[in-house]
């Protein structure tokens, strides 16, 4: 026998109690049926990270020393300020902590993703200026410095007192702080890629011993010029290295940096992201044309091509693509010099 009166009373009681106890996570996002676009109050970005638990996107802006927080529909929900030179972002495996490289603060910040409060700030040394991050096990690896004084350091997070170590690769190895990449599917491995000179070195480091040991290294693998982005497939069996040249997106075998597939795009490649289902988003810097080519793994033709802002002269940002963790949404950043960026949320 149904008792609607009792159900209604229970419903009212729950509604009255919710404000007292709160909720542990935002309400589930509704399915996205068409792309959305949101103007952002920044004109530059350095990195993005996605949080599956709280359904949040984080965007670091090194210029305004802030981090924008949006929901998965692209709506701005919070701005985290006082993050000097916020340059790179890494999320902990449990999504409870967002680590931020503070290039202007000579430190790495740890932010509680539930409260947005900074719970720790780890000093990396005066003048170190950390730029890029990669998390492997209990250690954050970071690139730092400037010009040929750049190097790689580590922040070991385990134990009662986190420990910072600097100068872990030979002096003069890098022309500037290299881009770093890691994956839970490749434990003990960190990829480093040169961003500042056309002779773009890519090195695969074994970091399992607590110090970077070169597994393999190449200059201009696949003929690639200055590196704009690095991305792993979900299983870390494929590495995408993206540079302005050649005018294609190249997939590599991480163990020896051999090209395994060429995805035909056009000039000038500047971003790549791979979804949990393996779908590849290949981005290019093309202000008056198509911005994103979507491929299935190993395909020779794109399944879809996207022009984000037709006829506006605004192009995709370098390193400006990232998927939601479930692969249902692709986030893309567009902009032009001196103008505010736009965040696009594209349904898969």
Image (cartoon, rainbow, N blue to C red):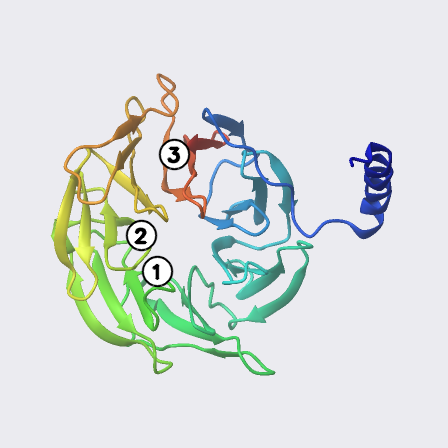
Q: In this view, does 272 lie to the left or right of 246?
A: right
Are the residues flagged by discs 2 and 1 in contact, CB closer than 8 Å? yes
The numbered mark, 2 or 1, whose residue comes first in the sequence reads 1
The numbered mark, 2 or 3, whose residue comes first in the sequence reads 2
Q: Along the line of sight, which residue is nearer the eye, 140 or 127?
A: 140
Q: Nearer the viewer, mark 1 or mark 3?
A: 3
Q: Distance between the residues labelled 2 and 1?
A: 7 Å
Task: Assign a secondary structure to mark 1.
Answer: strand
Can you name the residue that lies furthest to the front here? 1
Q: Quadrant of residue 182?
A: bottom left
Tell me which residue sits at (49%, 35%) in the image: 43
- Give the residue at mark 2: 231
Q: Along the line of sight, which residue is nearer the eye, 145 or 118?
A: 118
Residue 172 seen in the figure: no
The numbered mark, 1 or 3, whose residue comes first in the sequence reads 1
- Give the residue at mark 1: 181
Q: Which mark is residue 348?
A: 3
Q: In which quarter of the image is the C terminus?
A: top left
Q: Position of residue 15 (x, y in %)?
A: 82, 40
82 above or below 157?
above
Q: Position of residue 90 (x, y in %)?
A: 48, 58
Q: How far apart are marks 1 and 3 (CA)?
A: 24 Å
Q: Where is residue 118 in the image (x, y as percent from the top left)?
A: 65, 60
Q: Which of marks 2 and 3 is in front?
A: 3
Q: Quadrant of the N terminus?
A: top right
Tell me which residue sits at (59%, 33%) in the image: 75
Q: In which quarter of the image is residue 293?
A: top left
Q: In this view, does 170 lie to the left or right of 13?
A: left
Q: In this view, does 225 lie to the left or right of 143?
A: left
Can you name the residue that lies furthest to the top here? 311
């Amino acid at each position: 026998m149904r008792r609607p009166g009792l159900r209604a009373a229970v419903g009212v009681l729950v509604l009255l109690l919710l404000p007292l106890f709160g909720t542990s996570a935002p309400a589930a996002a509704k399915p996205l049926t068409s792309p959305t676009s949101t103007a952002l109050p920044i004109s530059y970005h350095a990195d993005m990270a996605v949080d599956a638990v709280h359904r949040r996107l984080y965007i670091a802006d090194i210029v305004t020393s802030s981090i924008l927080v949006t929901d998965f529909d692209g709506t701005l929900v919070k701005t985290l300020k006082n993050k000097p030179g916020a340059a790179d972002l890494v999320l902990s495996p449990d999504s409870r902590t967002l680590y931020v490289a503070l290039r202007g603060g000579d430190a790495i910040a740890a932010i509680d993703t539930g409260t947005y409060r900074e719970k720790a700030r780890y000093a990396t040394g005066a003048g170190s200026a950390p730029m890029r991050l990669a998390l492997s096990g209990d250690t954050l690896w970071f690139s730092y410095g400037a010009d040929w004084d750049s190097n790689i350091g580590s922040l070991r997070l385990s134990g009662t007192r986190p420990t910072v170590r600097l100068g872990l690769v030979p002096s003069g190895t890098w022309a500037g702080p290299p881009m770093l990449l890691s994956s839970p599917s490749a434990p003990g491995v960190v990829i480093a890629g040169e961003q500042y000179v056309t002779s773009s070195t890519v090195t695969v480091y074994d970091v399992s011993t607590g110090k970077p040991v070169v597994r393999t290294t190449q200059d201009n693998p696949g003929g690639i010029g200055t590196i704009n982005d690095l991305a792993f497939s979900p299983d870390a069996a494929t590495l995408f290295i993206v540079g302005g040249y050649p005018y294609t997106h190249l997939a590599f075998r991480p163990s020896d940096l051999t090209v395994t597939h060429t995805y035909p795009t056009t000039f000038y490649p500047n971003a790549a992201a791979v979804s949990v289902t393996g779908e590849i988003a290949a981005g290019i810097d093309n202000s008056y044309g198509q911005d994103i080519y979507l491929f299935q793994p190993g395909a020779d033709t794109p399944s879809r091509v996207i022009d984000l802002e037709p006829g506006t002269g605004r192009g995709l940002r370098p390193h400006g693509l990232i998927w939601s963790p479930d692969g249902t949404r692709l986030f893309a950043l567009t902009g032009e010099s001196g103008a505010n960026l736009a965040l696009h949320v594209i349904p898969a």
